[in-house]
Amino acid sequence: MNETPTRVYAEIDLDAVRENVRALRERAPRAELMAVVKANAYGHGAVECAGAAQEAGATWLGTATPEEALALRAAGIRGRIMCWLWTPGGPWREAVEADVDVSVSGMWALDEVRAAARAAGRTARIQLKADTGLGRNGCQPADWAELVGAAVAAQAEGTVRVTGLWSHFACADEPGHPSVALQLTAFRDMLAYAEKEGVDPEVRHIANSPATLTLPESHFDLVRCGVAVYGVSPAPELGTPAQLGLRPAMTLKASLALVKTVPAGHGVSYGHHYVTDAETTLALVPAGYADGIPRQASGRGPVLVGGRTRHVAGRIAMDQFVIDLGGDRPRVGDEAVLFGDAERGEPTAQDWAQAAGTIAYEIVTRIGGRVPRVYLGG
């Protein structure tokens, strides 16, 4: 867009995305890197961030849904794309024709992708997912032999090519958690079985962002980095973004919509959960939970105005919330920074996560579609 929005907007620094991808590649120098751009690149903009990540050396892109993968193709994004969250009747043929790698966790999915490959008249690229202990998607060890055998048979008939074997950690953001070593052992065992049965994958991968940062033995051929690509720490226990060599890519800003003086004893916002204890200045921030500002952070969410950090006064409403400025009197239209980079003295997504009782992943991802994205750095 040509003009900066005035209500609320998210600045997305694509140079930060590039720097983060390079930093993550240095953490896993012998592995390729997949930049995960699901959920609109964790709220940052999938197409723009996919391009920036590829420019910085990401050789794979990852999405959850096939629709997300197909949207990247429609936008002209080339290179390897993988998607992993399928339901029966999904757009298998479209994905096969778009040269998207599709994840297969069970026999039903293998049957559907084989049918799609026959209809398309081309070989489908599939990756078999092993459930090594997360207990979510993926094939259980007890069912692995059946799935691998059927995939090898499908490969022999030419309907599929098994390009990858993969899994996902449950607790990689808790270094030393006993499940991490157990999952690695299970993954190696399931890899060994599949390869013994004739699978020759291009990539084997289990490492997510925290494992990429802390667990070199999990890197295999490819690391899948999601939230770290956007400069968000995958867990406070691992360190701040700066300590991990990352830089936040999103800065959420708004313009003050009203500044006014109110007397002592004045209730603020719904339910009057906040009442002024003296004459004070209130400012209205024109963003609310319809924009993705978590209502759970009412009374606690930090906002930087005029070089000082304030906090939400009272409840966050659908479209707006209030901050108490004490005696300060900024001008209507002055900038309010909800979160950005701690190295610039700004509140962070992690600060909002703590205020809302959630994780920083959710804070950036939930910023809604009516919040314009303004891209910096090309």
Image (cartoon, helix red, strand yellow):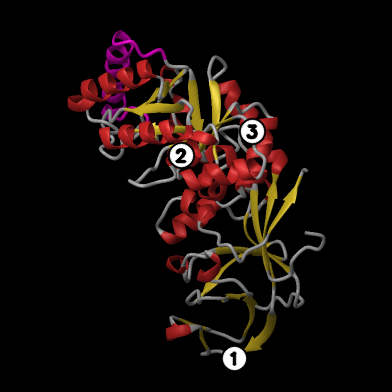
- Contact (Cβ within 8 Å) of mark 2 with mark 3: no
Percent x, y of residue 132: 27, 28
Counting other residues with Cα less than 10 Å from the Cα at mark 1, is it few (<14), some (14-19), or many (20 or more)? few
Q: Is residue 141 visible?
A: yes
Residue 323 placement (x, y as % from top left): 59, 74
Relative to residue 62, is residue 304 drawn left or right? right
Q: Quadrant of residue 117?
A: top left
Residue in the foreground of this view, choosing between 348 and 35? 35
State the residue at coordinates (45%, 41%).
235
Amino acid carrying label 1: it is Pro
Q: Main secondary structure of the magenta part?
A: helix
Instruction: Judge depth for marks 1 and 2 and give the one in front.
Output: 2
Residue wearing tag 1: 263
Q: Quadrant of residue 50?
A: top right
Q: Is residue 349 within the magenta segment?
A: no
Q: Circle 3 sits in a helix, a strand or a loop, which is it?
A: loop
Identify which amino acid the numbered label 2 is placed on.
Arg
Residue situated in front as seen by the camera: 314 or 130: 130
Distance between mark 2 and mark 3 Cα atoms: 18 Å
Q: Amino acid at mark 3?
A: Arg
Q: Earlier in the sequence, mark 1 or mark 2?
A: 2
> Dot 1 lies on which element?
loop
Residue of label 2: 93
